Image (cartoon, rainbow, N blue to C red):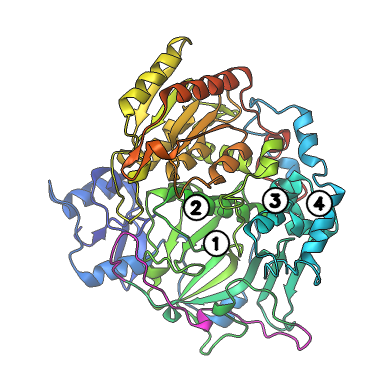
Amino acid sequence: AANIYYLYAKTGKFLHTEKERTETIVFNATVQGTATIIPTTIVNTARKAASPPGNSIKPLLKQKETAAKSAILTSTVGPASSWKDFANTKFTAINVPITTLQKSPYAKTKICPIEVSKRLNAKTLSHDDIEWCKWATSKKGGNVQVGKSWGNLKATQERKRFDALNCNTVISRGTNPSCDDAWGDNSVRQWKHFSRAHNFSCDNNKPSSVQCYINDNKDSFCILEKAKIDFSQMTSTENAASILNRSKRKFQKSFLTVDCQTTPSTSQPEFVFPHLFTDSLSSPHHCDHTIKGTVLMYSHDHIHNICHTMQDLMNVLLILWLQGTARHPEQVTFLNVDSLRLYNNNNDMINDFFEPYKRMFPPLLKGVDFGSKTVCVQRLLLQPIPPKGFVWEGWESDSPCSFIGPSSLFQRWNLHMRSLFHLIHDGVAVKPVNKVVLLIRTEKANPWGSARSSRLFLNTDQIKEAIKKTLSTRQSWVFEVHDFAKMKFVEQIQLMSETSVFIGMHGAGIAMSMFMSIGSPLCCAVLEIFPKGEFTPARGHGNMIRKMGIHYGRMDIDGQHSHSDGAIVSVSVLSNVLGHLLQQVQSNSSCVLSSVVNDPYLEEGWNS
């Protein structure tokens, strides 16, 4: 029994609490580093033997801990193989016939009027706007090179205008784009089917293939068939120095390879991670581990900030949409490898914000756990480069499309996430949303160094009383005050799904509004409060919230009432804005686009 290790299958950690031990998969990692799933019937006996009463489980021997980690989910990771044998294995693609799809799980959701969809599909630009876009990309004018350089557009306002007008689409496709082209289903469909699919031509006798899809913004999404990842070509940081480890992880060019020598006429595409890629396999052709299905390899931005994590979560679902596999993410293995895209290196840490991943992809793998081994993958999905700016697009400017109507991509993501957490039934929130929540901060600084002091409320008691007074004239409203720093991530999601109006200072916590119960009665509104200073230009959260179909209110505090240690909110202004938002959710609750309800996994028109 001492040889039984309770691996934290989804994080790679050893488990310490009773709940963790009983909920995870149990492995025996004693025989040559291989693992066998232990039958459920002996779990209790093994737990008692391996963990004396009152003591947490601790690895008895370092080499057995290493063996346990190297075993990594044998149901997903296969044994060693020669490259020849691996290359000859057949890959079975996920196949879900459209004709047999189940009915939409969001049947009872409030549907937006057809007029909203018409507005989103209408052409957005005037003749002058189109001419300006042409000037911006002309050599004698702005000389912008889409996806590469801003050229002569030096002024921030000019660059904001270029993005706001979606000039990339105007130039790349020669069309007047709609909001659906920019932030709707069509933006994904044209990326996969109608844009320049870029094949990396291989000799016919080679087993590997590379296919890259390039959209109007020159964003690249690539799929590799029969690829090898060599973790000996990645420098590993075994012990993170702090919660946010800024050390740089280095990769050699042969970290990622395919057995695919190009024909002379083929040029290297605008490839994802070009600094990691080579088009031939190094000798010997050997795989220490094999994964026969589809692997999604992803590198995160800032895993300790939910706003940054939200950006990555949305891009992960985008990959599944591009693949047509969003209905069955459990058939995809998630591989977390830090620093591929940015320098943030957290040793491939998987924290509480990864809970949606744990529910979508039961096998969560960490690059660091493979040590210096090689892993051969039948199909490898690489994240879009650059990532689609779900969060960051128009961070300091209002997005025009967000005022026209909701984004089907944002709304589809919302319904998908809430379903993962069992917070939705037929599109309706499991619990009614007649709650006003005030988000407060009690810590002046967080562990990773981001200052919070200027965004503290200095008159919290007055704010609470003002909200209570505003609600007193309305029936059946509940008011609660919460501090997310004292709540688990899952608890935050649960709370937001039950919240009708969310109030808080500008910060990452506002991004949790993305889990509000759109399409349900009395949903939803957000009031974001800004102290005077460095955060004043921010418009990003407002864009996100409106794209979700949620009412948004903004309240700016003047310099006289904004201080380095916090801000004083005008309770009279707060009451007026809150009253207006309450009226909006009562008279015009949020709706969901029919395209989202009818095609919840963005499968229409896909070759599954």
Relative image position of residue 473 (x, y in whole percent): 46, 9
Foreground residue, 198 or 457? 457
The answer to whether 343 is drawn above or below residue 265 in the figure is above
Residue 129 bears which disc, if any?
A: 4
Magenta segment, which residues? 238-266
What secondary structure is marked by label 3? helix
User: Which is in the foreground here, disc 3 or disc 1?
Assistant: 3
Q: Is label 1 in contact with label 2 (beta carbons under 8 Å)? A: yes
Marks 1 and 4, the one that precedes in the sequence: 4
The answer to whether 573 is drawn above or below residue 179 in the figure is above
What secondary structure is marked by label 2? loop
Residue under numbered circle 3: 164
Q: Quadrant of the N terminus?
A: bottom left
User: Which is in the foreground here, disc 4 or disc 3?
Assistant: 4
Instruction: Please state which amino acid type lies under the numbered disc 3.
Output: Ala
Horizontal arrangement in the rendering, residue 510 relative to residue 106 (left or right):
left
Marks 4 and 2, the one that precedes in the sequence: 4
Q: Quadrant of residue 272?
A: bottom right
Q: Residues within 10 Å of mark 1 (few under 14, many from 20)?
A: some
Instruction: Please state which amino acid type lies under the numbered disc 2.
Output: Phe
Q: Is label 4 in contact with label 3 (beta carbons under 8 Å)? A: no
What secondary structure is marked by label 1? strand
Residue 361 bears which disc, if any?
A: 2
Instruction: Please state which amino acid type lies under the numbered disc 1.
Output: Leu
Instruction: Please state which amino acid type lies under the numbered disc 4.
Output: Asp
Residue under numbered circle 1: 296
